[in-house]
Image (spheres, helix red, strand yellow):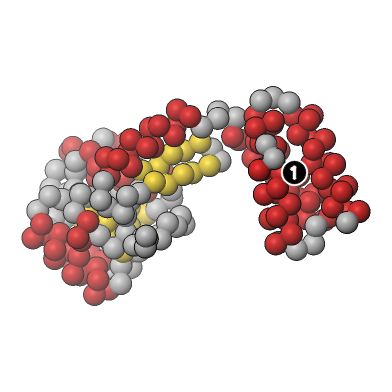
């Protein structure tokens, strides 16, 4: 089965982004962009519907949308329901090679806004390629309940051993194989069960064996 979209994570710090609308989707996505460090411009006919603590962080442009508003913009999101307006926004973005997401109108999307699971430092994005956003949301909620709570500690622990392995195992390919073998052997399950000493000993033993080989 071919994948029509490629999952990536964007660095938007200090990069201008444009949001259109004032409904829940616009406000939620706008806050996410602001928290990611984006410079957010908003076109909304009902600015008063935006919570003040979010509105004060935005740059406001007068409605309606004008193509010249796209100058220097990296990313556009429209939460408007009017297809004729969204069609015009899509054409203007395509002409300028700017990525656009239109909420619940995949025919106008050049990128998909995924459902996101945040378990610091992990960020997991889920998408159905625009075919079923509600299904992506269902899977997000399911994963949030099932993922371990101590992923932050796990990541710090693994980072320590990963750094050490780089000095013992010279190539990226060999290190990848080394860790895959340990993971497949249940290393992470042992750590997450609370038996950290055993997990440490397994890695130490594997590194010693690898050095001898």
Q: Is residue 202 above or below residue 69?
A: above
Where residue 146 sits in the image (x, y, percent)? 48, 29
Instruction: Look at the image and tell me in which quarter the C terminus lies.
Output: bottom right
Where residue 161 sits in the image (x, y, percent)? 76, 44
Q: Is residue 26 above or below residue 53?
A: below
Q: Residue at x 74, y 59 (%)?
A: 174
Q: Is residue 134 left or right of residue 200?
A: left
Q: Is residue 14 visible?
A: no
Which residue, given by chain and number where applicable, does mark 1 sit on?
Answer: 160
Instruction: Look at the image and tell me in which quarter the N terminus lies.
Output: bottom left
Residue furthest to the top in view is 194
> Helix, strand, or loop for circle 1?
helix
Where residue 100 sits in the image (x, y, percent)? 27, 61
Q: Residue at x 69, y 31 (%)?
A: 191
Q: Is residue 88 visible?
A: yes
Q: Residue at x 88, y 47 (%)?
A: 208
Q: Nearer the viewer, residue 84 or 6?
A: 6
Q: Residue at x 84, y 41 (%)?
A: 204
Q: Is residue 82 above or below residue 95?
A: above
Residues packed near mark 1 inside 10 Å, few (<14), some (14 to 19) or many (20 plus)? few
Q: Nearer the viewer, residue 89 or 193?
A: 193
């Amino acid at each position: 089965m071919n994948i029509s979209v490629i999952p990536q994570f964007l660095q938007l710090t200090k990069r201008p982004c444009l949001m259109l609308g004032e409904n829940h989707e616009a406000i939620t996505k706008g806050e996410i962009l602001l928290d990611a460090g984006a410079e957010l411009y908003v076109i909304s006919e009902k600015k008063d519907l935006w919570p003040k603590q979010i509105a004060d962080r935005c740059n406001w442009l007068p409605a309606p949308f004008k193509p010249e508003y796209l100058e220097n913009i990296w990313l556009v999101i429209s939460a408007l329901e009017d297809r004729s307006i969204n069609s015009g926004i899509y054409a203007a973005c395509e002409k300028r090679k700017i990525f656009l997401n239109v909420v619940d109108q995949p025919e106008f999307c050049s990128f998909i806004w995924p459902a996101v699971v945040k378990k610091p430092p992990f960020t997991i994005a889920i998408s159905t390629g625009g075919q079923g956003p509600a299904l992506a949301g269902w899977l997000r909620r399911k994963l949030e309940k099932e993922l371990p709570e101590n992923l932050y500690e796990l990541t710090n622990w693994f980072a320590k051993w990963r750094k050490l392995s780089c000095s013992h195992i010279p190539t990226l390919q060999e290190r990848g194989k080394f860790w895959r073998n340990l993971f497949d052997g249940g290393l992470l399950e042992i750590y997450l069960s609370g038996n950290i000493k055993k997990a440490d000993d397994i890695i130490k033993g594997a590194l010693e064996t690898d050095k001898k080989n």
